Image (spheres, rainbow, N blue to C red):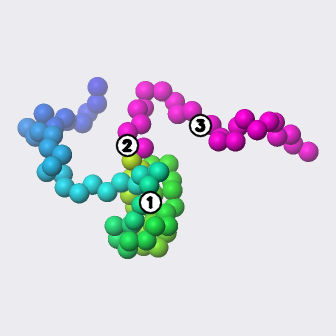
Amino acid sequence: MTNFPTLGDLGLKHDPKGRGYHAVYREQEVNHCPGCGRTHWLIGRVSAECAFCATALPLAEASTRHHNGPAIIQHRNRNQGHAWAA
């Protein structure tokens, strides 16, 4: 379906140990920047950027999300009644 060759087509095999250290931003944990060690982050849709040294990390949740259907975004305060405009 795609024009990109797979690892098998290239004669390579999947080897996670050969990949080395793979830093990701985890949402429910304290994340220290691998560049400067600080913990202040600017969070985007698929990556987080250190607010001090601009080191970017991919979001762990973004890489594990299945793209079979549309993402449903719900506000965490959605059950607190209706907000009426003036």
Determine the residue positioned at 39% across, 47% down.
Answer: 60
Q: Residue at x 27, y 54 (%)?
A: 22
- Residue 27 visible here: yes
- Mark 2 / mark 1, whichever is N-terminal: 1
The residue tagged 1 is: 30
- Residue 20 placed where, x, y %? 19, 55
Mark 2–mark 3 Cα distance, whole angstroms, equals 17 Å
Q: Are marks 2 and 1 in contact (CB under 8 Å)?
A: no
The answer to which image quadrant residue 55 occupies is bottom left
Within the magenta stretch, is there residue 23?
Answer: no
Element marked by disc 2: helix
| Secondary structure, magenta segment, majority class | loop
Amino acid of disc 1: Val
Q: Amino acid at mark 3?
A: Ile
Numbered badge on residue 63? 2
Q: Nearer the viewer, residue 38 or 19?
A: 38
Q: Quickly name the residue at label 3.
A: 73
Rendered view: 35 above or below 21: below
Q: Give the image location of residue 12, x and y in percent.
A: 10, 40
Quadrant in the rendering for residue 10:
top left
Q: Which residues are the magenta region?
A: 61-86
**Image point 46% across, 51% down: which residue?**
27
Question: What's under tag 2, amino acid-wise?
Answer: Ser
Q: Residues within 10 Å of mark 3 (few under 14, many from 20)?
A: few
Give the farthest residue toward the front.
29
Does 35 appear above or below 19?
Answer: below
